[in-house]
């Protein structure tokens, strides 16, 4: 199994010169420690509220050429409309 450092990626939309965060991808691979499952967690963000939208297995990163960066780029490109 490949080991990947933690990742966090926010996605924002610009409204009248102000960036508003609308989504977040957080990856965790720490051996399921502290009761948190190793996975990729995708959240919808509205103001200060963050709601879990989807959880994916961490192993999905192995399918992408640039691992986590390739996954993030393709995920946002394919799914950005779900966050607007």
Image (cartoon, rainbow, N blue to C red):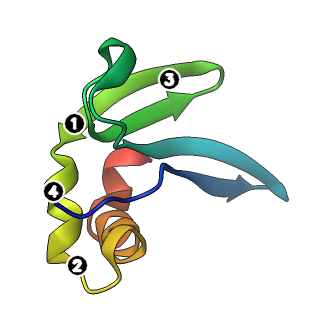
Q: CA distance from mark 1 to mark 3?
A: 14 Å
Question: Residue at position x 26%, y 86% from top?
Answer: 65
Q: CA distance from mark 1 to mark 4?
A: 12 Å
Q: Position of residue 79 (x, y in %)?
A: 29, 59
How many C-alpha atoms fall within 10 Å of the one at disc 4: few (<14), some, or many (≥20)? Answer: some
Residue nearest the viewer, comparing 34 with 49: 34
Circle 2 residue? 64
Q: Is residue 78 left or right of residue 22?
A: left
**Residue 34 percent location from the top left of the image:** 38, 14
User: Given this view, does label 2 or label 4 mark the residue nearer the observer?
Assistant: 4
Question: Could you tell which of marks 2 and 4 lies nearer the N-terminus?
Answer: 4
Q: Residues within 10 Å of mark 2 (few under 14, many from 20)?
A: few
Tag 1–tag 4 contact (CB < 8 Å): no
Closer to the chain start, of discs 1 and 3, is 3
Contact between marks 1 and 3 (CB within 8 A): the answer is no
Residue 71 spot, x, y in % from top left: 31, 69
Describe residue 15's horizontal placement relative to residue 47 as left or right: right
Q: Which residue is drawn at the image coordinates 21% and 36% (left, top)?
A: 55
Q: Which of the marked residues, 3 or 4, is nearer the chain's N terminus? A: 3
For the residues labelled 2 and 4, the Cα–Cα distance comes to 10 Å
Which mark, residue 59? Answer: 4
Residue placed at 38% from the left, 59% from the top?
4
Q: Give the residue displayed 37% in from the left and 37% down from the top.
A: 30
Gap in Å between the C-alphas at discs 3 and 4?
Answer: 24 Å
Q: Which residue is mark 1?
A: 55
Tell me the residue that label 3 is attached to. 50
Mark 2 or mark 3: name the one nearer the start of the chain.
Answer: 3
From the viewer's perspective, is residue 61 above or below residue 33?
below
* Label 3 element class: strand
Q: Position of residue 23 (x, y in %)?
A: 49, 44
Residue mark closest to the camera, 1 vs 3? 1
């Amino acid at each position: 199994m490949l080991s990947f450092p933690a990742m966090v990626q926010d996605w924002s939309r610009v409204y009248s010169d102000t960036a508003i965060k609308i989504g977040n991808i957080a990856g965790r691979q720490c051996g399921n420690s502290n009761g948190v499952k190793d996975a990729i967690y995708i959240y919808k963000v509205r103001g200060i509220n963050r709601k879990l939208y989807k959880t994916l297995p961490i192993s999905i990163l192995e399918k992408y050429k640039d691992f986590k960066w390739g996954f993030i780029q393709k995920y946002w490109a394919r799914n950005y409309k779900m966050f607007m």
